[in-house]
Amino acid sequence: PPSSSTSSTSSTLTSTLTTTTTTTTSETTPTQTPTTTIPLPTRPPSIVEAEARTARELSHAVRKLTNDLRTCNTRVNAIEEGFQNLYVAHLGNVDGLRKCREGMILAPEDIEKLDDVESLEGIVNPALLEQAQFKEDQKARTKRDEELASKHRTLINSLETRIESLVRRERSWERTISELQARRDLLERREGAWERTIGDLMGEIEVRARREDWWEDMKREMEGRIGALSQIAVVERFGQGPHHVSMTVLLEEGNPSSQRTLIFELAPIELAPHSVHLFLTQIAEGYWSRGTPAIVLNAEHVLQACPHPCLDSVDLGGRTPGYPYEDMRAAGLDVVSFQEYSPAFPHEKYTIGFAGRPHSGPEFYINLLDNTLDHGTLEERKRRMGQAEYGAWAEEAFGGVEEVDVGEKDMMEPYPCFGKLVEGFDVVDEIARSLTRASLPKDDLDDEDDMERVDLDENMLLRPVKIASVTILENYSPGAKAAGVGEKKEKEGGSETTTTDEL
């Protein structure tokens, strides 16, 4: 139930509203009109309505006060701002007056006036001066702080930029370090693989070196055995020696008067037993006396002779292709088994040796010059030339002494030298002066085939010197007559007869 105070408040508000309405109406009506009394409601207002009305009135009063306060604050701010501006202008004027005073000489009374102008004490409220000074100092501090803040921001931005750059560099370095570590690991693995490979290769090299030494030892042993067997065979079949061979040649084919004789003394059998045995066996088997053996090549440093049927081969102008000495190969008499050579019997002028390498024979040549350096061993060349000259020659020949491989080493093996000319030097010199195909003008060739043939066989004699016969001499004595140079024993039907060699 409502209290008595609430009822009195409601009646008071009702009377107040009635009075206010009457007053407002009387004020707004300029003429005197009869007063009309508004009848009050027969039902008094409720408590809720009274409180709502009171709240609205209070809200209206608060808004009005708020607006008044805002207006006052605005005016106060305007007054403070104007005073602050006046104070700043005053400080500027004072500063200007001070500068003027410093630049001029003034009387004492003028200086006192300036001092009075500079001082505002007694004119302006000190509180306002302090407030204005405080605000001015605060602005200065704010400006300084902003400048410092700007500098700090610039410095921070620069540091951040540097930090970002360093971070990027660090990341780049990390990637680089990772890549280097990966490469290091890869190189370590490769190094390990290379070490294993090198170890394997060194093992293989050692094995091959042992095998090569073993092969060399076996090769020397086999060469020694072949030489010993050849020496026994020479002694048994052809005697102890020295052995002499007679070669009859026709300088002009079909002209018996151009017949000449060459006498060769073969090397001692202890120096070249295998080569001497091969050559004597070829002669004894008739390979140098039948068919068309001839001296066919003149290479300026040698004259080269070949057995039958070399003139029929394609290389020398014939029409028989392929290897021409198949019958000698079948008999095992075409080439030497190894490149037999003795430094005690070098390739000097007028000595004879088997042609071709690494397997020489059956063709042989007569040295027209001292060919020891070119046809002998590398050790002999080195000994005769000296270390410096030999090194320069080896560098030009095959790129250095250490660069000689197995194939080149085989091609550098010496030619077998197994005899020397003892009679017929003038005949050899006369044959050496003969013309070769290389001396012909190329315009004389009929077609391209001849041109190619000149390129291949340019050292071929225009007129090959035919070999009429080659015989083995016994009991040779220098200066003996041609008809009695030697004798050959032949066994016929178990009896032994002696016949004179015809030269």
Image (cartoon, rainbow, N blue to C red):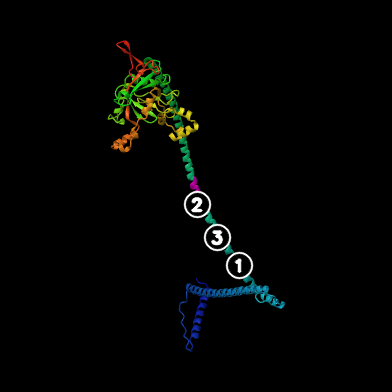
Q: Are marks 1 and 2 in contact (CB under 8 Å)?
A: no
Q: Residue 193 in magenta?
A: no
First along the sequence among labels 3 and 2 = 3
Earlier in the chain: of badge 3 and badge 1, it is: 1
Taking the spot 59% from the left edge, 65% from the top edge, the residue there is 144
Q: CA distance from mark 1 to mark 2?
A: 41 Å
Q: Which residue is mark 2?
A: 168
Label 2 crowd bin: few (<14), some (14–19), many (20+), radius 10 Å: few
* Quarter of the image where the C terminus is located: top left
* Residue at image mark 3: 154
Q: Is residue 353 visible?
A: no
Residue position for label 1: 140
Q: Residue furthest top?
A: 495
The answer to whether one can see residue 85 in this image is yes
- Between circles 1 and 2, the one closer to the viewer is 2
Question: Quick one: which residue is furthest to the right in this view?
Answer: 108
Query: Residue shown at 47%/40% (left/top)?
Result: 187
Q: Position of residue 319 (x, y in %)?
A: 27, 30
Mark 1: amino acid: Ala
Nearer to the camera, 119 or 158:
158
Disc 3 marks a residue whose amino acid type is: Thr
In the image, 460 versus 399, the foreground residue is 460
Q: Residues within 10 Å of mark 1 (few under 14, many from 20)?
A: few
Q: Which residues are magenta?
A: 166-177
Decide: is 154 above or below 257: below
**How many angstroms separate mark 3 from mark 1 (CA)?**
21 Å
Which circle, 3 or 1, is nearer the viewer?
3
Q: Where in the figure is residue 153, as x and y percent of width and height?
A: 55, 60
